Image (tube, rainbow, N blue to C red):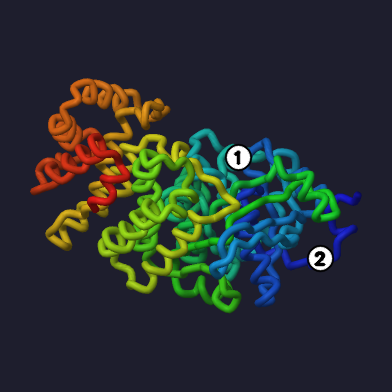
Amino acid sequence: MNTLNRNTTKVNTYTERIIQFGEGNFLRAFANWMIHEMNKKANFDAGVVAIQPIDQGLIKMLNDQDGLYTLYLNGIKNGQAISEHEIIDCIQRGINPYENYNDYLANAENPDLRFVISNTTEAGIAYNANDKLDDAPQSSFPGKLTALLYKRFQAFGGASDKGLIVIPCELIDKNGENLKKIILQYASDWNLGDGFVEWINEDNIFCNTLVDRIVPGYPKDKMDAITNELGYKDNLVVEGEQFHLWVIEGPASVKEEIPAEVCGLNIVFTDNMEPYRTRKVRILNGAHTTLVPVGYLYGIDKVRESLEDNVVGGYLKDTIFNEICPTLDLSKEELEQFSNDVLDRFRNPYLEHALLSISLNSTSKYKTRVLPSVLEYIKRKNELPNRLLFSLAALIVFYKGDRNGETIPLKDDQSALDFFVSQWATDDIPAITKATLANTNFWGTDLTAFDGLQETVTKHIENIVNRGIKEALDTL
């Protein structure tokens, strides 16, 4: 059986217009798939040169397959559960700068180069004071990129039309701004001159981004069946969900250069991504955190099963549409579409998310993902969000560590676990509620200060403990 490569498979070749730092599962299932779609449907003609950002990686394996790999997209699409696969051919070659630094740096002299994409983990956009211009390579990703940009600045004499559009995908806030800040720090450290700094500021665009697609990665347990289905060997098969969202914050000119709209891609170009970040945290992440204690105490173990249950699924849907969406500022149509997409993602039959795996550090997750919706709802409506507070009550009961005689394997900071052990030892529900809500280490504020909140949560806890969560849910 042949191994996938450009000799055994007829694919396209594209002009190298993109430098990509990172060759892992996420970029290949996310950005590279979108580039592939734009190449097919909009003549984007954008080939990718993948750069291995650390000394261990997949570049050799990628080059063995001439940059080709098979992507499986599994999930709900247009209301139907669909699994589809395709060979992605936008990566033209890969470079390991730890072995071929000169080949890496030579990309700076490519007149067609226009974009930089990266995903070097959350720790990748970081300053390393030990990096030097003459290192081969620099240890940090920003150091490597600074060296490449300076080489390009020199090669084209600081030409304004040879600046790049930098689109990082690392999961940190203001990723583009942070990356640019570090590059300017290196420019100062390495004495690269005012001309280079001006070129960076005036002729290069650093976009902040928000990325969203679940990528389980390499389906190791299914590879025998997948290989039989494909009829060729592929060591770089990657799986992703159907849903995708890429929010790119930058000037309007960026949208003009990326033909996403004509391809039907869910890429949002904006000059302010904060509403989209807030939407994701409150609806997607917030719904997960809201669901965990309710679904698990109800006797359900998986996210998908929770959505398929009429009671728990109905509870979550009502919470999202009636108590979370009203706290957000995007249009009703946008919020409802995103919410329905989230519910479809939770129902994905190809992905099994255990509620317990999401329960890690649930107190801090409630603070960042759900509590802002609670407080904003109170502010806007001048009333309490009953369902969101029911989840808080269920969370407090969850930390009792018992589900119908079965021990719950709680995972949180030891101080949080110790707090709940001492509280539940009293079995005094009003006192437990008061102490928990007043714990500013958990919430950053004293929740007992909000009129009626303590009484509402106490009542929900009493119903869950004394009557069971199924009957307690009925009271909503």
Residue 11 shows which numbered tag? 2
* Secondary element at image label 2: loop
Is residue 453 left or right of 139 when viewed as pictured?
left
Secondary structure of the residue carrying tag 1 is loop
- Horizontally, residue 391 falls left or right of residue 106, namely left
Residue that appears at 63% across and 55% down: 29
346 relative position to 37: left or right: left
Tags 2 and 1 in contact by the CB under 8 Å rule?
Answer: no
Can the viewer see residue 32 in this picture?
Answer: yes
Is 395 above or below relative to 337? above
The x and y percentages for residue 304 are: 49, 50
Q: Residues within 10 Å of mark 2 (few under 14, many from 20)?
A: few
Of circles 2 and 1, the one toward us is 2
Front in this rendered view, residue 103 or 295? 295
Relative image position of residue 57 (x, y in whole percent): 68, 40
Residue 111 in view of the camera: no
Residue labelled with disc 1:
138
Of the pair 382 and 58, the residue shown nearer to us: 382
Which residue sits at x=32%, y=45%?
A: 470
Q: Earlier in the sequence, mark 2 or mark 1?
A: 2
The three-letter code of the residue at mark 2 reads Val
Could you tell me which residue is drawn at 27 percent across and 35 percent down?
Answer: 396
Q: Any mark on residue 19, and which?
A: none
The correct choice, above or below, for 421 with respect to 367 in the image is above
Q: Position of residue 79 (x, y in %)?
A: 54, 68
**Mark 2 vs mark 1, CA separation in Å:** 34 Å
Q: Amino acid at mark 1?
A: Gln
Q: Quadrant of residue 52?
A: top right
